[in-house]
Image (tube, helix red, strand yellow):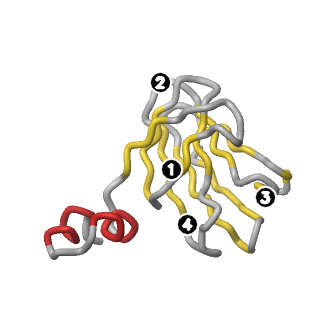
């Protein structure tokens, strides 16, 4: 799969290249609640966290589109879904992503999310 840089080299706009490319977007977790967490704007994320802070899935996510998230920091971070959404059967749920672990998260139908964690 081409990287975002490869696609931009072919004159693709940066935002679209970031969505379609396979380069991880570095994202710093912030906020300690679902409402204040950093919003995800790409499908391949390298998250850094400092403990109880987190990132939040986009409200305009397409059903069936996977999001790949890797926590490269020395602290656990949280991954939230949008307000009123369900993650793994929990309303307004969050996923605790430990140090150097990864998750694949997708919306399997409108407002309902599932995830798979690495061991």
- For the residues labelled 2 and 1, the Cα–Cα distance comes to 15 Å
Q: Are marks 2 and 1 in contact (CB under 8 Å)?
A: no
Q: Tell me the crowding category of disc 2: few under 14, some 14 to 19, or many 20 or more residues within 10 angstroms, Cα based.
A: few
Q: Mark 3 points at which residue?
A: 85
Q: Tell me the crowding category of disc 3: few under 14, some 14 to 19, or many 20 or more residues within 10 angstroms, Cα based.
A: some
Q: Residue at x 50, y 50 (%)?
A: 69
Looking at the image, the residue that sits furthest to the left is 9
Q: Residue at x 58, y 29 (%)?
A: 76
Instruction: Name the image quarter holding the C terminus.
Output: top right
Q: In this view, does 68 lie to the left or right of 61?
A: left
Classify mark 1: helix, strand or loop.
strand
Question: Which of disc 4 and disc 3 is earlier in sequence?
Answer: 4
Q: Mark 2 points at which residue?
A: 74
In this view, the mark in front (3 or 4): 3
Residue 52, x across and y down, in percent:
64, 26
Q: Tell me the crowding category of disc 4: few under 14, some 14 to 19, or many 20 or more residues within 10 angstroms, Cα based.
A: some
Q: Is residue 22 left or right of residue 47?
A: left
Residue 6's place in the image compared with 88, above or below, is: below
Query: Residue 3 falls in which quadrant of the image?
Result: bottom left
Q: Name the residue under label 4.
A: 66
Residue 81, x across and y down, in percent:
70, 52
Q: Residue at x 45, y 29 (%)?
A: 73
- For the residues labelled 2 and 3, the Cα–Cα distance comes to 28 Å
Q: Are marks 4 and 1 in contact (CB under 8 Å)?
A: no
Residue 56, x across and y down, in percent:
61, 48
């Amino acid at each position: 799969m081409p990287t975002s840089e490869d696609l931009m080299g072919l004159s693709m706009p940066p935002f679209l290249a970031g969505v379609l490319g396979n380069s991880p977007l570095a994202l710093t977790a912030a906020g300690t609640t679902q409402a204040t967490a950093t919003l995800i704007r790409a499908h391949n994320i390298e998250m850094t966290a400092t403990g109880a802070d987190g990132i939040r899935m986009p409200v305009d996510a397409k059903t069936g589109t996977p999001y790949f998230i890797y926590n490269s920091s020395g602290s656990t971070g949280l991954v939230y879904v949008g307000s009123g959404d369900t993650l793994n059967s929990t309303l307004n749920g969050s996923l605790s992503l430990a140090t150097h672990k990864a998750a694949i998260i997708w919306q399997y139908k409108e407002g309902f999310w599932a995830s798979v964690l690495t061991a």
